[in-house]
Amino acid sequence: MKQIGIFYSSSRGKSEFTAQMIKDLLKEKCELFKIINNVDKINNVDKLIFIIPTYGAGIPQEDWIKSLEKISQINFTNKTIGFIGRGNQGFFAATFIDGIKPIYDIVIEKGAKVIGFTSTEGYTFVKSKAVIDNKFIGLALDELFMYQETKEKLEKWLEKIIDIN
């Protein structure tokens, strides 16, 4: 098993693309898993990145919803998690990356250490459940309205939370 588990879901391929970008940067340090059939793999790694798209009214992508019960049964003590929220701050400004929050709440309750909080500066959303103390509870990506910044934001975030060299 690799040092870092990257868990994602992807209906349209954007989160899978983000996961692959991370894999390209971290190389052999990580392994990619679609969450829907791999929740049990969380037990095998202590460092995790969860990539969670938000849909419509602020809900996580359906594979995360289907996995919530299994996720809630895991002991996250001694696990460190970084969240990447994917959303659309233009069309869904009042629910921007809200999909992170239900999973965040579960892992915090189950003992996880969450890292990688990021500034809300430069974003134009109205509100987000994924903001605590004026910071996102992970990396916020808007690949529709901020696509040109995605790679740079991802690289800087990874450098902050992981030794990528």
Image (cartoon, rainbow, N blue to C red):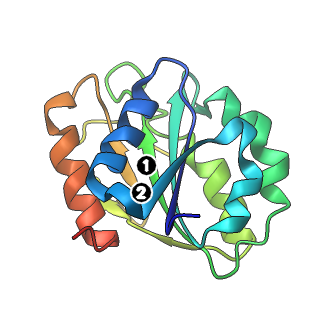
Task: Please tell me which residue lies in front, 163 or 143.
Answer: 163
Q: Residue 144: horizontal and vertical position, in percent? A: 28, 22
Q: Residue furthest bottom?
A: 78
Left or right of 141 in this view: 128: right
The residue singled out by tag 2 in the image is 138
Disc 2 and disc 1: Cα gap in Å? 5 Å
Res 58 quadrant in image: top right
Q: What residue appears at the point 34 percent right and 49 percent down from the top-left corner?
A: 22
Cβ atoms at labels 2 and 1 below 8 Å apart: yes
Q: Is residue 59 left or right of residue 119?
A: right
Q: Which mark sits nearer the N-terminus, 2 or 1? A: 1
Residue at 24%, 41% in the rendered image: 123
Residue 131 pos. (x, y %): 44, 55
- Is 114 left, or right, of 110 in this rendering? left
> Looking at the image, can residue 119 be seen?
no
Callout 1: SS: strand
When the figure is inspected, residue 127 is found, relative to residue 82, above or below; the finding is: above
Image quadrant where residue 106 sits: bottom right
The location of residue 84, given as percent across then percent down, is 43, 49
Specify the amino acid type for callout 1: Ile
The picture quadrant where one finds residue 35 is top right
- Closer to the camera in the image, 24 or 133: 24
Q: Which residue is mark 1?
A: 84
